[in-house]
């Protein structure tokens, strides 16, 4: 695994190093979607280059994208004014929408337009080469040095715009920021795609802003979180054979959720220490309301997706089998055994098929066709067995609606009313 993932991991480190720092500025300025806007402008430039006959990964396409991005950077720098009647975020949104629509119009005239858009969105970080990583690092190093040399005016404009506006030429410094930011985005999107670049820019900086106060502390925390997510996302992608870019982005989402839960728990613990059990009243009302709504939905629409009940039945199978007859339980058990055997057989034949595709297992054309037909037939059998399980599940739901739904509805509604009417202790 290491021999395949070390180059993508280094690319993720390079992205983390530059994007977390820029993300701190983006959050402080309140221009959250400037990355997406500039990335979309760059994508429009690549699309026009593609329509002109240049390959997506060619040098010509890169310079097209960079020229468009610098134009967007100049527009954003010029649109930043104090007490402007139109917020800068509105300008950013308009640029994004128009660039996206223009790219769609251009792609409509280009062959394989859908594949082109997909490549721009998700990138190809898994196939990155060491040479590409080195080129990216050499490009970002002088940009990092530039930002270090001019850190004082840029930090003042980002974190104290009112005070800096009276002392500095804000538009000139803004152009330096947006121009360097545009170079980074153009180069990163070419390698990793729009979604992954946006995640590296915003998510670590957002989580760091919630965990640290100073700019230096946020930078260090953001770098640490970016490193952690890069490792976790790449390992998860390799383990479960998932698209790498999308997996890393989802891992960033998990990180944000974990930070939010941790902060909520910490705030709840602090409130409990200060106010006692009365601090738990609000969350308790919410929990009772959720229980009541879950019971009500089970009573009214037993055939809809009840995820909490699916999770309960997966963890404790008796939660479903208790509501099945003896014959239905036996049918369920036999069907699950059949599905396990069929899935194992499908995996075995699919492994043979992959070996044949990669040339590690010599097979004849007749054998290929027999494997294809066998997989199709076995898949139909599995689909039939799963239909049986869905039928049994529907029968259990029809009985659970009364034996589970009604008690949950009464418990949740009663608890909500009691807690809402209960007077706090004085």
Image (tube, rainbow, N blue to C red):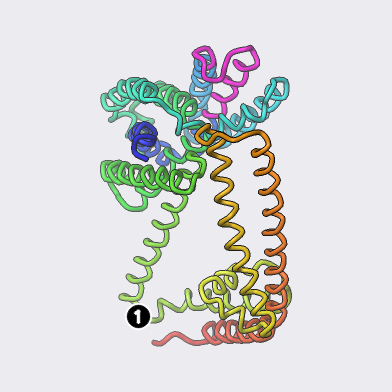
408 relative position to 252: left or right: right
Quarter holding residue 331: bottom right
Q: Position of residue 46 (x, y in %)?
A: 57, 20
Q: Position of residue 317 (x, y in %)?
A: 56, 76
123 relative position to 304: left or right: left
Q: Position of residue 323 (x, y in %)?
A: 65, 83
Which residues are drawn in magenta? 38-61
- Examine the rendered structure and indicate whether residue 165 appears above or below residue 417: above
Q: In this view of the protein, which residue sits in the foreground, 243 or 376? A: 376
SS for callout 1: helix
User: What residue is drawn where x is 72% and y is 65%?
Assistant: 387
Which image quarter is the N terminus in? top left
Q: Is residue 40 magenta?
A: yes
Q: Main secondary structure of the magenta part?
A: helix
Which image quarter is the C terminus in? bottom left
Task: Provide the residue designation for mark 1.
Answer: 276
């Amino acid at each position: 695994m290491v021999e395949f993932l070390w180059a993508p991991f280094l690319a993720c480190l390079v992205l983390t190093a530059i994007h977390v720092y820029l993300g701190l500025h983006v959050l402080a300025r309140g221009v959250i979607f400037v990355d997406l806007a500039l990335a979309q402008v760059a994508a429009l430039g690549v699309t026009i280059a593609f329509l002109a006959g240049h390959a997506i990964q060619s040098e010509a396409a890169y310079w097209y994208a960079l020229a468009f991005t610098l134009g967007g950077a100049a527009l954003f720098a010029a649109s930043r004014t104090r007490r402007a009647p139109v917020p800068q975020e509105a300008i950013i949104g308009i640029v994004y929408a128009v660039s996206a629509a223009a790219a769609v119009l251009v792609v409509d005239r280009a062959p394989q337009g859908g594949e082109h858009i997909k490549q721009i969105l998700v990138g190809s970080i898994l196939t990155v080469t060491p040479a590409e990583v080195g080129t990216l690092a050499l490009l970002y190093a002088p940009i990092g040095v530039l930002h270090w040399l001019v850190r004082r005016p840029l930090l003042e404009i980002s974190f104290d715009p009112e005070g800096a506006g009276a002392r500095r030429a804000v538009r000139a410094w803004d152009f330096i920021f947006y121009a360097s930011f545009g170079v980074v985005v153009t180069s990163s999107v070419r390698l990793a795609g729009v979604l992954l670049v946006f995640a590296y820019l915003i998510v670590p900086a957002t989580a760091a802003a919630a965990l640290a106060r100073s700019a230096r502390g946020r930078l260090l925390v953001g770098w640490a979180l970016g490193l952690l997510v890069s490792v976790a996302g790449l390992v998860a992608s390799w383990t479960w054979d998932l698209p790498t870019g999308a997996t890393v982005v989802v891992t960033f989402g998990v990180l944000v959720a974990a930070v939010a839960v941790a902060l909520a728990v910490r705030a709840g613990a602090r409130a409990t220490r200060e106010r006692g059990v009365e601090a738990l009243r609000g969350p308790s009302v919410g929990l009772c309301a959720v229980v009541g709504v879950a019971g009500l939905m089970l009573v009214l629409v037993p055939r809809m997706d009840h995820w909490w009940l699916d999770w309960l039945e997966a963890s404790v199978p008796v939660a479903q089998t208790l509501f099945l007859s003896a014959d239905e339980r036996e049918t369920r058990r036999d069907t699950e055994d059949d599905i396990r055997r069929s899935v194992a057989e499908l995996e075995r034949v699919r492994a043979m098929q992959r070996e044949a595709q990669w040339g590690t297992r010599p097979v004849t054309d007749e054998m290929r066709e027999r494997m294809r037909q066998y997989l199709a037939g076995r898949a139909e059998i599995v689909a039939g067995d799963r239909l049986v399980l869905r039928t049994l599940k529907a029968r259990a739901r029809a009985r659970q609606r009364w034996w589970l739904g009604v008690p949950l509805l009464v418990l949740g509604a009663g608890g909500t009313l009691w807690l809402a009417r209960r007077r706090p202790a004085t």
